Image: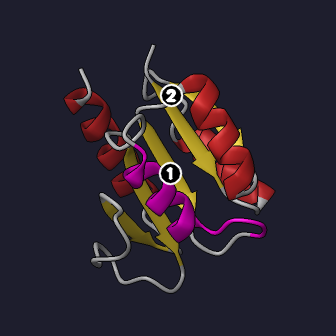
Amino acid sequence: MKKVLIVDDETEIVQLMMWVLSGCGAELLTAYDGEEALRIIQLHRPEIVLTDVMMPRLDGRELCHRIKTDAATKDIVVILMSAFLPRNSVDSCADCTFTKPFDIVEVSQTIEAYLAKAA
């Protein structure tokens, strides 16, 4: 089964994204900061990491950089979410960005499209 890792230090956002993506056909994993996310990525190798930018301990941009510069994880799709990023801005090495507040339908459709490509 394909996996999506949701990373955000706000529990409400994680719960919202779990609800939004509950029907996407993927196993949903969660982390509450970038360091925890890296551990989960090493253990579970998700196809997609959906991460907030502003987090304690290791922010989303650095998490993205570490994923994309590691040969073992560079093919993982990284999607950044932030109140401070314009939609689809060229930021870090992310595959896609969403501005908070985001359109949950658009996020869901984007995740589903990336999952379909990861066949």
Judged left or right of residue 2, residue 38 is right
Quarter of the figure that contains the C terminus: top left
Judge whether residue 15 can be spotted in this image.
no
Query: Residue 30 occupies which quadrant of the picture?
Result: top right
Q: Which residue is mark 2?
A: 45
Q: Earlier in the sequence, mark 2 or mark 1?
A: 2
Q: Is residue 67 above or below residue 100?
A: above
- Distance (Cα) linking label 2 and label 1: 13 Å
x, y percent for residue 105: 39, 52
x, y percent for residue 78: 41, 52
Q: Which mark is residue 50?
A: 1
Q: Disc 2 marks which amino acid?
A: Arg
Q: Nearer the viewer, mark 2 or mark 1?
A: 2
Judge whether residue 26 can be spotted in this image.
yes
x, y percent for residue 2: 43, 21
| Region of the chain picked out in magenta, as a range | 56-70
Image point 27% across, 77% down: which residue?
90
Image point 65% across, 50% down: which residue?
16
User: Toward the viewer: 66 or 90?
Assistant: 66
Q: Secondary structure at mark 2?
A: loop
Q: Disc 1 marks which amino acid?
A: Leu
Image point 38% across, 40% down: which residue?
76
Could you tell me what secondary structure mostly forms the magenta stretch? helix
